[in-house]
Image (spheres, coloured by chain):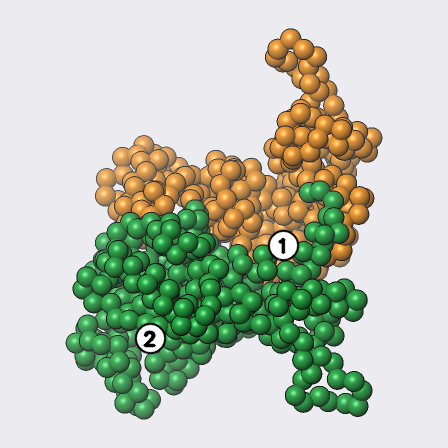
Chain colours: A orange, B green
């Protein structure tokens, strides 16, 4: 450590202010000063600087309470920093341009079938699609975040493997960085889902959140003491490949009875008596048609979901578990039943006075929002 | 953030130097300067200050290489800061006084049977025993670390429950703090075991280490990116209560087939054909007598050990797993077999290029060393 010079302090304060505006949205100077523990003159200087640079705008709030002179609202300007978010899933890919403050400025998506799912095709299509979107909107992205349903090394965006996409080793970060000509951060989709829930979803205000989501595969991400947890070499764990049923079905990972094989999309189809690889829409429609009246059809499925969640809570001790993707299509009564069971059966939940278990409310945008936040992590400090 | 003043910088540098001497041991001024990135005059000033306060001593090294004037060795002085380490286990309790630099200055232990295991008795005995030890050695402890095989809230040392000790809720941190009249930090024994391995054991130099240990119960602690991970509200997870065998034996936690019921002490006794609650020494002797020639007697036991470790590695993605306590008594060939299996069967290990799995080499002192390090965490900055 060397002595912090005044310009370093100013830069630190400016970047804290940018982060606060980005995550919490418009606020008055007074509220910003309180939140950051800075005095009014420091906040004024910082806000004036940001306004000069076009990063924020100050406006009289529409509704001003009280008698005195209304406090000016500081509004983040989305165009001040735009990032490209990319979400590659098994059946489709999506991109979005997301502005400072988290506003989605425009988006595009396409189906992935057969050859379209090859890494080369995905990279080409993402680059073309991003260029078209940016031109249409008259915006320029300065960084990109990409999420992939696979094992990803965060340091350089190497996809070690994405079984459900049938990808082997792909240097995705490096290759997309070259074609897009901007910094690219690549992550596992559940990891970025956890980030999205932490910054924009049910996990706001919680310091220890686990996000667990089911698509074709099952994945999870962990926010611990306010930060996204990563394993060794930046590899996130693969919670879907926790064995919950040693006598269960074979998994592509080589083991039997992984949580993924018991509560992933195929397992849900089997529970509903549907063909295993049907379109996603049909599964969701079937679940909706139950109107919560599912009798004992889902008993086994919910038991495996409960058992895995008891493990997750016992191992990681979170205060909140957010269920994403296909899990959000489960009837509310089923989720309530699972949550009650987990609170009863997990000794760590009992010690904590009851873990909360909630469905994600960020919908289909979740992963794009997470990918955008991952990109913003490196960008905000530079604004 | 405010501007760092020169005295704050000095304090920060001094505390970095103290931590380095404490964890890495004696070193020359030149080596210390290199390790901390400080120049020679700063190091001289800091070392002179510490020498004046009696925290270090400078000596000519016994063997000095090369022709020039030998570089003086800076040696931490153990008496400069002494902490009390307390390890409460199911069958016995131990205390030690540990000095700055990690040296064990003296110790004492006693059996816990029947009423001696009651919290009141344990607290009284720890306090008396600590007073006698301190007087014998002419030392005064300035803080204490205590490890318990149970669910512990780190913030205030509340033991929520320690099933194998038959403890309910015990305000251990508060009560010991009062009788010992010093700051007391209480933690789960596997958590402090992880800390000991990180600072003094196989985990030195690894940033992502899982420590897993078997006694009557099975517990684990995680070092992630160089820090001890804690769950929500400071509760550590309870990895021993991950279900690995849903059709398995009942566990005191209310579930079936917890990892603890499949690889804890009782399970090992069953595998060896011994009575379940025999003395620890008999189990170790039986394992030694096998001379690695255990045929298929341990097959089931090792399979559950493997399965749980595959889960741990898949979920947390560590670079190193250290096996503690009863696991260290397993034949080396059995541990090698388990490690090979985990590397083959865990997809995350495959992505990482192979997780390392090693036995702890800290022996019976492990938990005392960990408890001491937990106490030192709050102490070093004040020296």
Q: Which mark is residue B163?
A: none
Chain designation of label 1: A
Mark 1 surroundings: few (<14), some (14-19) or many (≥20) residues within 10 A: many
- The image quadrant of residue B48 is bottom right
How far across and how far down the image is residue B22, in percent? 58, 69
Q: Answer with left or right where residue B338 lies relative to residue B101.
A: left
Disc 2 to disc 1, how far (Cα)? 41 Å
Q: Is residue A274 left or right of residue A2?
A: left
The residue marked by circle 2 belongs to what chain? B
Q: Is residue B68 left or right of residue B32?
A: right
Helix, strand or loop under label 1: strand
Labels 2 and 1 in the same subunit: no
- Residue that mark 2 sits on: B326
Q: Report the disc number at residue A186.
A: 1
Q: Residue furthest right?
A: A52
Please report the residue visible at 26 percent of the width from the left and 80 percent of the height from the top: B281
- Crowding near the residue tagged with mark 2, few <14, some 14–19, many ≥20 C-alpha atoms within 10 Å: some
Q: In this rendering, which labeled residue sits more in front, label 2 or label 1? A: 2
What quarter of the picture does the N terminus of chain B occupy? Answer: top right
């Amino acid at each position: 450590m060397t002595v912090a010079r005044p310009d370093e302090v100013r830069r630190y304060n400016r970047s804290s202010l940018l982060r606060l505006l980005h995550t919490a949205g418009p606020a008055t100077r007074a509220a910003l000063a309180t939140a950051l523990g800075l005095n009014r003159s420091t906040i004024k200087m910082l806000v004036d600087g940001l306004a000069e640079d076009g990063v924020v705008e100050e406006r009289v709030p529409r509704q001003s309470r009280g008698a005195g002179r209304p406090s000016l609202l500081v509004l983040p300007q989305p165009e001040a920093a735009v990032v490209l978010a990319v979400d590659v899933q098994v059946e489709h890919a999506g991109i979005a341009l997301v502005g400072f403050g988290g506003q989605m400025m425009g988006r595009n998506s396409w189906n992935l079938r057969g050859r379209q799912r090859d890494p080369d095709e995905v990279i080409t299509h993402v680059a073309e699609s991003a260029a078209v979107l940016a031109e249409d909107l008259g915006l320029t992205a300065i960084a990109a975040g990409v999420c992939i349903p696979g094992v990803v090394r965060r340091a350089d965006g190497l996809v070690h493997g994405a079984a459900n996409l049938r990808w082997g080793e792909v240097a995705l970060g490096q290759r997309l960085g070259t074609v897009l000509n901007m910094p690219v951060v690549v992550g596992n989709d559940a990891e970025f889902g956890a980030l999205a829930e932490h910054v924009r979803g049910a996990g706001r205000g919680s310091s220890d959140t686990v996000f667990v989501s089911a698509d074709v595969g099952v994945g999870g991400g962990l926010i611990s003491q306010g930060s996204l947890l990563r394993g060794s070499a930046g590899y996130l764990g693969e919670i879907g490949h926790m064995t919950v049923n040693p006598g269960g079905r074979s998994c592509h990972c080589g083991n039997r009875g992984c949580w993924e094989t018991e509560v992933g999309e195929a397992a849900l189809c089997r529970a509903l008596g549907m063909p295993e690889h049907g379109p996603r829409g049909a599964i969701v429609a079937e679940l909706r048609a139950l109107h919560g009246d599912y009798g004992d059809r889902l008993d086994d499925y919910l038991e495996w979901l409960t058992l895995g969640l008891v493990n997750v809570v016992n191992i990681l001790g979170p205060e909140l578990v957010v269920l994403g993707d296909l899990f959000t299509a489960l009837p509310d009564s089923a989720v309530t039943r699972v949550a009650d069971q987990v609170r009863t059966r997990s000794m760590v939940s009992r010690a904590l006075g009851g873990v909360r278990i909630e469905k994600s409310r960020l919908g289909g945008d979740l992963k794009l929002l997470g990918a955008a936040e991952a990109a913003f992590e490196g960008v905000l400090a530079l604004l």
